[in-house]
């Protein structure tokens, strides 16, 4: 069951994050941008009412705060 929930969250985040209109500065990106650049979801952890999703591509990694399907914020962690 947890795998199904995680898969549903990941799918919603990847598709709906494209619609995000929030301003981001510096190296910040949306989950949709990262997915389109070939990043893969490696892990997710609950953080209160939000999730922190870790995405990786080769040697680069991002941590994304997932609030809902239209509000995500990703920052590099390395």
Image (spheres, helix red, strand yellow):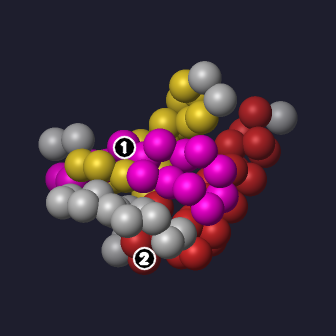
Residue at 18 percent of width and 53 percent of height: 59
Residue at 53 percent of width and 69 percent of height: 20
**Residue 55 at x, y percent in the picture:** 39, 50
Q: How far apart are marks 1 and 2 (CA)?
A: 16 Å
Residue at 74 percent of width and 53 percent of height: 8
In the image, which residues are magenta?
58-73
Residue 55 visible at all: no
Main SS class of the magenta portion in the image:
strand
Image-quadrant location for residue 30: bottom left
Instruction: State yes or no: discs 1 and 2 in contact (Cβ < 8 Å).
Output: no
Q: What quarter of the picture does the N terminus occupy? A: top right
Q: Name the residue under label 1.
A: 63
Q: Does the magenta stretch include residue 1?
A: no
Residue 14 visible at all: yes
Residue at 24 percent of width and 61 percent of height: 25
Q: Name the residue under label 2.
A: 36
Q: What quarter of the picture does the C terminus occupy? A: top left
Q: Which of 25 and 47 is in front in this view?
A: 25
**Residue 18 at x, y percent in the picture:** 54, 75
Disc 2 is placed on an element classified as helix
Image-quadrant location for residue 49: top right
* In this rendering, position of residue 15 left or right of residue 40: right
Image position of 46 with respect to 54: above or below = above
């Amino acid at each position: 069951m947890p795998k199904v929930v995680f898969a549903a969250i990941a799918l919603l985040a990847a598709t709906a994050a494209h619609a995000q209109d929030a301003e981001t500065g510096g190296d910040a990106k949306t989950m949709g941008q990262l997915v389109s650049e070939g990043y893969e979801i490696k892990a997710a952890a609950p953080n209160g009412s939000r999730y922190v999703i870790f995405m990786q591509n080769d040697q680069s990694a991002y941590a994304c705060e997932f609030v809902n399907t239209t509000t995500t914020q990703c920052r590099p962690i390395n």
